[in-house]
Image: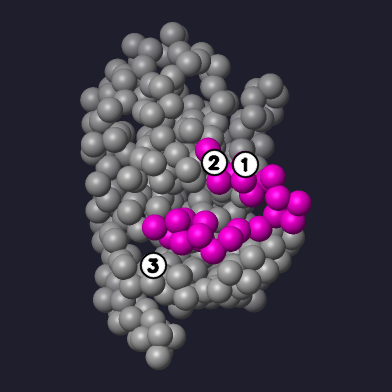
Amino acid sequence: ELIKLDAWYQEQLPKVIQSRKDKHLVHEELVKIMKWKLMRGKYRPQLLDLVRINTELAVKSTSKKAFRKLPNLSGAITALTNLKGIGPATASAILAAAFPEQAPYMADESMLSTPGVEATDYTLAEYLNYAERIKTCTEQLAKKDPESTWTPHKVELVLWAHYVARELKPSLLDDLAKHKDKVPSANGNGPSATTTTTSADDDHNVASNGAADDAPLSSPSDSRSSADLAQVTNDESSSQDGLAENNGTAAAEDDSSSSAIATDDAIVPDVSPSGKGTKRDLEAEEEESTEDVKKARA
């Protein structure tokens, strides 16, 4: 089910949103995005119930308003967080699906792989800092290869894939040198990206956004071939070069709403000293979400 949801998020949802005259989400799509996000991390049914409380009209009008604010990421994220159960991270997932050329998803793995991003605290300010650095990297990659079609979302996918490979099967990365001269440059990674080589879509469906450290990643990720992963991490190397050049130079957008928004994403996880993992304590969030659901049902 997770693989199917990921394929829907990466391949189908962007086309559906762009096909609409007035770009917007519908209620069913919002629920599926939240379900996808939760299945990537620790499943919290209370949050799914909270998102379901939103009305069809609220989802449509709020998402339409948010999309119109782009390329102002701060305004778009703030608008989406007016929906029940939606915080900056989930809002970024919505924007990355609708406008991948403007917004990366706030994936833990991608943020931890980005120079200048110290933690994943799920605040608007942290997202803007992260998004600015990803954008700068994207622009540098485009300059190096004008024929490529790099987007912030593709850069985020590459960072995610490399992080997961390093955690689950680092031996694949040790073999990169053997494939370095054989793998042509690519213009991204993942189901929503186009590449200059042919690969199995099913293998790439799982190289997507935002899995928390406690997500069941091993099964889909280990199905990659060495050649596929070599291509992914070859791209990641270029991405990291672009990010490193701008470490300390990118600035977050100044916004009065940059404080943490008290929703599903505004929880500060414990980050291990090694920076390889995160732990989330969402007990307070569950209690708050449960109370909101009870009140709404009452």
Q: Which mark is residue 15?
A: 1
Where disc 2 sits, the SS reads: helix
The answer to whether residue 58 is above or below residue 200 is: below
The residue shown at (40%, 85%) is: 297
Where disc 1 sits, the SS reads: helix
Q: Which amino acid does label 3 sit on?
A: Leu
Instruction: Please provide percent x and percent y for residue 107.
Output: 43, 51
Instruction: Please provide percent x and percent y for residue 165.
Output: 31, 34
Please identify the quadrant where the N terminus is shown. top left
Q: What residue type is labelled 1?
A: Lys
Front residue of 139/23: it is: 23
Colour scheme of the picture = one colour
Binning the other alpha carbons within 10 Å of mark 1 as few (below 14), some (14 to 19) or many (20 upward) gives: few
Instruction: Please provide percent x and percent y for residue 122.
Output: 45, 65
Location of mark 2 (residue): 12
The residue shown at (64%, 25%) is: 148
Mark 3–mark 1 distance (CA, rounded to whole Å): 24 Å
Residue extending furthest top?
182
Location of mark 3 (residue): 48
Q: Give the range drawn in magenta.
A: 11-35
Q: Is-magenta flag for residue 25? A: yes
Binning the other alpha carbons within 10 Å of mark 2 as few (below 14), some (14 to 19) or many (20 upward) gives: some
The residue shown at (25%, 30%) is: 222
Sequence-first tag of 3 and 1: 1
The answer to whether residue 293 is above or below residue 116 is: below
Mark 2–mark 1 distance (CA, rounded to whole Å): 5 Å
Locate residue 177: give its quadrant. top left
Where disc 3 sits, the SS reads: helix
**Do the residues bearing badges 2 and 1 touch, measured as CB atoms within 8 Å?**
yes
Front residue of 286/177: it is: 286
Instruction: Please provide percent x and percent y for residue 181.
Output: 44, 9
> Magenta region, mostly helix, strand or loop?
helix
